[in-house]
Image (cartoon, grey):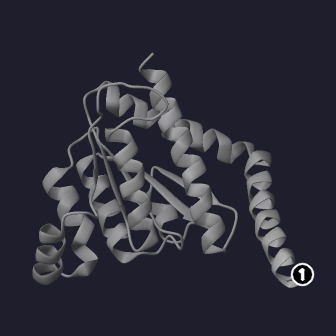
Amino acid sequence: MENLNSYIKGHFTDSILVKEQILKDENLITLIKNASLEVIKAYKNGNKTLLAGNGGSAADAQHIAGEFVSRFYFDRPGIASIALTTDTSILTAIGNDYGYENLFARQVQAQGVKGDVFIGISTSGNSKNILKALELCKQKEIISIGLSGANGGAMNELCDYCIKVPSTCTPRIRSSYFDRAYYLRYCRRRAFR
């Protein structure tokens, strides 16, 4: 039982240490702020966010989009946001016809317009289907925000804003996504006051 207590304490200690590293990194804080301002600008201009990820990151994309469309902190009109991970007919058609690596790029091509914001979530920063979507964002003048860990992987070179959690541990990275996503939603809230 004592080993389990140590494990639990270690888990929370590691999580706190990652968040302390984020707090000490003024460049990262500024990057998060600037990415948030892009999301606010998109909403004010009548644009939308498109979110994508694989596996647990797909669930994160859905969660974030759900709170953009529903509410966060206070009642307000719903805001256009699409998780590109949810429509099984679209996902299986694209996967079958164009390959899994084109899963999100095809949707960005069909649904994204200049001024939208694409949020790609990949703990490694190297998910091929996210990278292809990011390449298309450049062509379509869609602002791109990447949420990743450690060095950002290949995503680092493709995003307008690559927000990297200073960790290689997937659970630490993913828990920090929610801190960043909540901040994005909080900034959006302030924009509607």
Instruction: Please give the name of the residue rendered at 76% of the width and 46% of the height, measured from the top-left corner.
Output: 23
Q: Name the residue tied to disc 1.
A: 2
101 relative to 77, above or below? below
Instruction: Please give the name of the residue rendered at 74% of the width and 62% of the height, measured from the top-left corner.
Output: 15
Q: Quadrant of the N terminus?
A: bottom right
In x, y percent, where is residue 59?
40, 64
In x, y percent, where is residue 161?
50, 49
Determine whether, in the image, residue 51 is placed left or right of residue 16.
left
Q: Let me know if residue 183 appears in the view.
A: yes
6 relative to 175, above or below? below
83 relative to 105, above or below? above
Callout 1 amino acid: Glu
**Secondary structure type for disc 1:** helix
Determine whether, in the image, residue 86 is placed left or right of residue 174.
left
In x, y percent, where is residue 156?
52, 62
Q: Let me know if residue 144 appears in the view.
A: no
- Which of the 4 image quadrants contains residue 51? bottom left
Instruction: Please give the name of the residue rendered at 39% of the width and 43% of the height, measured from the top-left corner.
Output: 67
> Looking at the image, which is closer to me, 181 or 21?
181
Q: Quadrant of the C terminus?
A: top left
